[in-house]
Amino acid sequence: MKLKRILAVLSAVSVSVTMLCSCGSDDSSKSDPNGSAAADSVTDSVADETSSKEEENLENVYKLTSENVKLVGRTWYNEDALWLALSGAGAEFKYTGKKLDITIVGDGVASSGNADNQARVAVYVDGERVVDEMIDAPEKTFTAFESAEAKTVDVKIIKLSECAMSTCGIKDIQVAEGETITPAEKKAHTIEFIGDSITCGYGVDDEVKENHFSTKTEDVTKAYAYKTAQLLNADYSMFSTSGYGIISGYTTGSTPVKEQTIPQYYESLGFSYGAFEGSTTPHSLEWDFSSYQPEVIVINLGTNDASYCSAYSDRRNEYKDGYVAFLKKIRENNPDAVIFCTLGTMDNRLCEKMIEAAAQYTEETGDSNIHYMLFDLQNGAVDGYAADWHPTEATHEKSAQKLADEIKTVMGW
């Protein structure tokens, strides 16, 4: 910030010196010294005013870091933008002023023309969603709040869609003189969710089961994980990608899709085909676990693995062993968290192996700070289906209530 101010002043001085030199070399100015002096005075005045205004504006530019906002989920601040990849990532803050403009920057996917892969972003003011937009341009600015009188409001910016298809960033926020931005208050508890499309809210805005994937119909706020965090009054972080599993992504073949697994990316900012800025990808950036240590971690992985494992006992055991290994990685990075292993909303074929994995992990490590819970299978006849047979919001609400009740019982919240 100081460097920018210095540069602004130097720029103004340079303009002033240049104009002075120009006046000195002009014959007409020599014949009218009073006129020359007046021109110099005006130049100095303009330069001072320009410098003053630039410094005034700079003093009211808020960087979206932990000093000015509450960071939500795994984020990356670079240059003048807070970059988001994972579902639910964003920022929360209190704004005091008359008009708040928010600028969202897109990655290469934003201008690709592929509307089904572009990032979807929401802005809330005092709990009401006032912006819900697809980022289909390199940069888009939205007026989130406007009032004739200055007011203090709660603002929340959330990436609704998942990381794999696209990323986006929130530019530093500039406000008028006297207006302020301060971090939102932290909630009572902290929780992390690790999962797949169910956690992402895949297709929840499209209740036609024959329809397929689109980020336009993803909304993480309507999925069980986000709803569970709300029920528990907890700050959250999510690490989820559609189609991903423990040892294999979704497949209709007989070989595992090993490139689509969560454990290999868990220690990064997530996997994405889009890049944050230039060629920087989320999976090339290491996540600092010390910045967020959740009290509770919920794992919901195995639905996609089941497509590969099917009824093959050796593959199911491979899933179990992979699950144990992943639990060890999670514990290494989150030494104090209580871990909940969950499964079952769309497919329950690997539930038994998940339970065995939790037991085996405890036997091998002596760590008993781990629990499991089975979700009820979705009931399409009652609650319907979303795109590609995914859970509807009604199903997510039931899952969230069951999970929240289980966590409250175990944690005493």
Image (cartoon, helix red, strand yellow):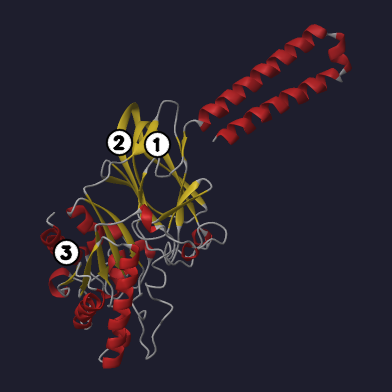
Q: Residue at x 20, y 58 (%)?
A: 228
Q: Residue at x 47, y 32 (%)?
A: 60
Identify which amino acid the numbered label 1 is placed on. Leu
Identify which amino acid the numbered label 3 is placed on. Leu
Residue farthest to the right, as pictured: 27
Q: Which quadrant of the rendered structure holds the N terminus?
A: top right
Q: Identify the image quadrant of residue 6.
A: top right
Name the side, left or right, on which 137 lies relative to 411.
right
Please tell me which of labels 3 and 2 falls first in the chain: 2
The answer to whether the residues at label 1 and label 2 have Cβ atoms under 8 Å apart is: yes
* Disc 1, SS: strand
Between 183 and 100, the one lying in front of the other is 183
Q: Which quadrant of the rendered structure holds the C terminus?
A: bottom left
Q: Residue at x 48, y 67 (%)?
A: 273
**Distance (Cα) linking label 3 and label 1:** 37 Å
Q: Identify the image quadrant of residue 308.
A: bottom left
* Disc 2, SS: strand
Q: Which residue is mark 2?
A: 153
How would you rate the neighbour count of disc 1 (Cα within 10 Å): few for under 14, some for 14-19, many for 20 or more? some
Q: Nearer the viewer, mark 3 or mark 1?
A: 3
Percent from the top left, x then y, of residue 40?
74, 15
Q: Which residue is mark 1?
A: 100
How would you rate the neighbour count of disc 2 (Cα within 10 Å): few for under 14, some for 14-19, many for 20 or more? some
Q: Which residue is mark 3?
A: 403
Residue farthest to the front, as pictured: 366
Percent from the top left, x then y, of residue 360?
23, 80
